[in-house]
Image (cartoon, helix red, strand yellow):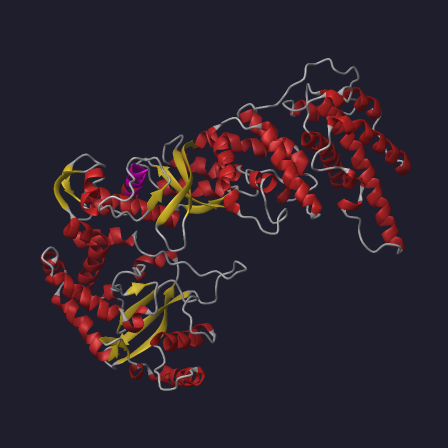
Amino acid sequence: MINLFKDLGECVLRKAGYYNVEDKTEKRKIFLNFQSIVPMPRKKKDGEDDEITNAISLDFDTKKRVFDFVLDEQLLIENRGYFFAFSTDANNRKKFLSTNNMPCFYSKFITDSIAYIEDKRKQKKSKQWFLENISQDYDELLKEIRDTFYLEIEQKKKKAYILNKDCIDSDKKGSLIEIEEKLLEKQKDKTKQIPVDALYNSLINKEFYNKDSKKSDNFTPVILAKIDGKHILEYESYRNSYINLVYYDLFERFFVEKGKVDKICHICGEKSNVVGDVSLLMKFYGTTNNLFFENLKNAEAYKSFSVCKPCLMKIFTGMKFTANDFKDYLLGNACYLIPETDKDAPDFDKKYKRIFKLLRSNDGYMNDITIINGLLQQAHRKNFKFNLLFFDSPPASQVFDIVKYISNIDYQNLSEKLKLFDKYNKEYELSLFGNNNSIKLYDIRNHLFPTKSSHNKADSSLFRKDILDLLEAFLHGNSMNYNVLIKRFMNIYRLKFNRNKIDELSPFKMILMLSIFNKIKSLKGVEIMETGNYVTQIQQEGYQKFFAEHHVVYENNSHRQGLFLLGTIINGIVYAQRKKSSTKSEGGSENKKMKASSTFLKKLNYNGIPARRINKLVAEVQNYALIYGIYEETGIWGTMMDRLQGIEQSTMKGEEIVFYILTGISFNKYLGLTKNLEK
């Protein structure tokens, strides 16, 4: 997996022109751009963009000797290079002038930056590097800002600096005084100074969010410090020093402070200076890859896993690019797509990004397949491969517990499988009933595992491994267990029925999925009966065609066909009951449409019906059919009874029996909807 990240990183850097640039500072900036925060508009809960779509900047006016909070450029991905923002680490000094942490600007970032640079200038290993790459002018700039805009105080018996409220721009001074007075009123000890975070957070919330709050968690994900209205990168005299400072902190220090000389890199095999401590952006656990180790002594880590500077740069770039561009959710699980890249392919990333859209599609797969095929044609390629890494990561953590790693997925093979869904959607015209009735890969999640329709609350961690095992079987063309699929489906269907949230077409759609899975690889555990167990022929062409199309479960199995036919009669009873209920409702005797749980469907035991009780169920169905005078297909009773002969001695499981009854109910429901649309 490390090598995949390295190859991806190399592709990304090459596409950005890294290897064509001579100037070392510009090369460093290109690399750092891929380590920076991706600016994106914050979303409201309803999915719309937040009203505040601009970053907030703290602007220091050195001429007027005032500071102000103002709105900056829009939070758009095309402004990523402008912001050049990096996440702060709670355990490290705050030294970035564009970051994701507003409170650090109130007291930390200037003093931390000065202390960090002074410390590195004194250390033996880093002294020379800072002498060559960080100018004294940058040190003086930081000190000027500190002395002009920050107030020296004593904090926990130590000298500290906080943003001086007397230096705020006159336009906001009134608001700041008003906020300070209100906060002081709420404070029990009136002699204590208002915390600087509470003061300025409240001001920003009032000015830009129209909120009365001391919290900063709703602030924009990028906040930057500016000097006289300019970003630090706009100053020729400071630009290189700042880029080099960030580069050192995020990358170079691993080699300067802990590097080992003339060691073999375990990635490229070349003899070079290697990093002395494994400091990967992502730490993965639960993998069998022998490049990952736990509880190593830092000083000896390079002996087990050493990496040179060029390789580590590629790995860092590949990991960050994956985290930013190739992260999504599939079947409800967080996932990284890790490409197996072709280093010379132009626009290599577009086809990989499209894979997530393809796998999550709600309206058919052919559109995305056509687009990806077009990208392949432009690149003079026919195919590509990729990997899916499903993980569980705590918030703001770089430690990942691997849930599932599905490797070596072949695109062309995948596209042929997904076309099977489109084939049945088109054949049965399911899109006519709305996109929710079209079968798709996501139905593995909807019909076989807990959702909001089946559970009030469901701990997804309890069944996500089973979901991903099924996904892996689909992607790699492994055989699926027929009995497990039926059991899972019936369990979820029963729960949905009890909550009156069933999808009445779902048993019919489950048959379509079983046929798809079987076309990929024969299902395990499907018992096929010998032909000749029945003598009558089914007269209904629709039923004949359905059995032939889905022959893996129906064609030579008389009992499954008989149960299906029983289901079609039950559907007629349910239709008659609902029609009668609807008529009464129009007459005023009832004011509510009959629910599924109020019809004959309530008489079915969704936990399973034993084979020995089928005759009793048939008799009850026959009685209800007479009572409601339902329309019966020609010869349906004789055909059904012929096929149900001997079922009481069969080995069919109870939930399987109910499932096949439901398929008949569901298919007849589908036929009814189709006729209504035709009318």
Q: Position of residue 255 (x, y in %)?
A: 17, 49
Q: Is residue 645 left or right of residue 580?
A: left
Q: Is residue 469 left or right of residue 673?
A: left
Task: Say how many tags the image has.
Answer: 0
Is 509 or 295 nearer to us in this picture? 295
Is 494 or 378 nearer to us in this picture? 494
Residue 423 against residue 319 in the figure, above or below: above
Is 146 or 455 nearer to us in this picture? 455
Query: Is residue 340 visible in the rendered structure shown here?
Result: yes
What is the magenta range? 1-9
Q: Position of residue 85 (x, y in %)?
A: 31, 60
> Could you tell me which residue is drawn at 48 percent across and 67 percent down?
51
Q: Position of residue 294 (x, y in %)?
A: 29, 43
Residue furthest top as drawn? 532
Q: Is residue 94 left or right of residue 505?
A: left
Q: Position of residue 261 (x, y in %)?
A: 11, 43
Query: Is residue 236 visible in the rendered structure shown here?
Result: no
Is 552 or 352 nearer to us in this picture? 552
